[in-house]
Amino acid sequence: MSVAETSQHAVQRAGLFLGPVASLAFVFSGGADMAPDARAVLAVAILMALWWVSEALPVGATSLLPMILLPVCSSLSFRSEEHTSELQSHSDLVCRLLLEKK
């Protein structure tokens, strides 16, 4: 293994460790005046940026992190059952759209 490969692996290991550490440090110490959802999104962005720069994970795997982490952090709210059940019937949807038209 050459010196360049050894230093590349060291950067990858450091990024793999520092990404979650920096992200958690931000969640628990910074952004006190931010909304919890905004804080979670920024923490995921910090994690992704550090992993992209250090290439700790392949870029494709890193790009999937928001789809995995944001629902877990409840930053992406899904529609409630009540809301989706209203949209299952086409006649209810048309009536609702007509009633909400301004």
Image (cartoon, helix red, strand yellow):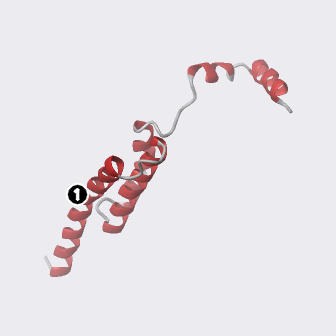
Question: With 4 as the anchor, is 79 left or right in this view?
Answer: right
- Of 88 and 51, nearer the camera is 51
- Residue that appears at 39% across and 62% down: 49
- Residue that appears at 76% across and 19% down: 92
Q: Please tell me whether residue 4 is drawn above or below residue 43 in the rendered image.
A: below
Q: Give the mark count.
A: 1
- Quadrant containing the C terminus is top right
* Residue 4 spot, x, y in % from top left: 20, 80
* Residue 9 spot, x, y in % from top left: 20, 69
* Residue 61 spot, x, y in % from top left: 37, 54
Q: Please tell me whether residue 83 is drawn above or below residue 60 in the rendered image.
A: above
Q: What amino acid is labelled 1 in the image?
A: Phe
- Residue that appears at 44% across and 38% down: 71
Considering the numbered disc 1 on the image, is that residue within a helix, a strand or a loop?
helix
Residue 82: quarter of image: top right
Residue 14: quarter of image: bottom left
**Residue that carries the numbered disc 1 in the rendered image:** 17
Question: Of all residues shown, which one is farthest toward the front?
Answer: 33
Question: With 65 as the anchor, is 6 left or right in this view?
Answer: left
Question: With 73 as the anchor, is 16 left or right in this view?
Answer: left
